[in-house]
Amino acid sequence: MTTAPAATTRSIFRAEGFSCPSCVGKIEKQVGRIDGVSAVDVKFASGRVEVEHAPSVSTDSIVEAISKAGYTSKLSAF
């Protein structure tokens, strides 16, 4: 018997305040701590943060985690 993979949601955020590439690691570490987040990919040049997460994880909790890392962000349509 096989089980279907758990459903995931992909959300994209725009973050501001990057000053150096080490900012990427700070955000990835903080967001990655959220239970239900399976992947975080931060694009330094564009400030784009892509997060794969369980549907139960709210986008507000991801914005809060980015804020804890020291950056402002908001959900983006693309």
Image (spheres, rainbow, N blue to C red):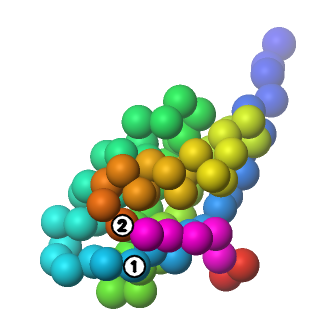
Instruction: Give x and y (percent) for residue 17.
Output: 31, 78
User: Is residue 27 a member of the stretch shown in magenta?
Assistant: no
- Residue 8 is situated, as x and y percent measured from the top left of the image, at 71, 45
Looking at the image, the residue that sits furthest to the top is: 1
- What residue is rendered at 50% in x and 51% in y? 64
Instruction: Using the numbered discs, state the Cα–Cα distance from disc 1 to disc 2 in whole angstroms.
Output: 6 Å
- Residue 15 position, x and y percent, is 44, 74
What residue is shown at x 20% (from left), y 80% (from top)? 19
Q: Residue shown at 36%/66% (left/top)?
A: 71
Quadrant including the N terminus: top right
Residue segment shown in magenta: 72-76
> Which type of secondary structure does the marked residue at label 1 adopt?
strand
**Of the numbered discs in the image, which one, if any, rests on residue 3?**
none
* SS state under label 2: loop
- The vertical placement of 37 against 1, above or below, is below
Q: Main secondary structure of the magenta part?
A: strand
Q: Which mark is residue 71?
A: 2
Q: Amino acid at mark 2?
A: Tyr
Q: Is residue 65 above or below residue 75?
A: above
- For the question of whether residue 16 can be seen, the reply is yes
Considering depth in this image, is 37 or 14 the residue closer to the camera? Answer: 14
**First of labels 1, 2 by sequence position:** 1
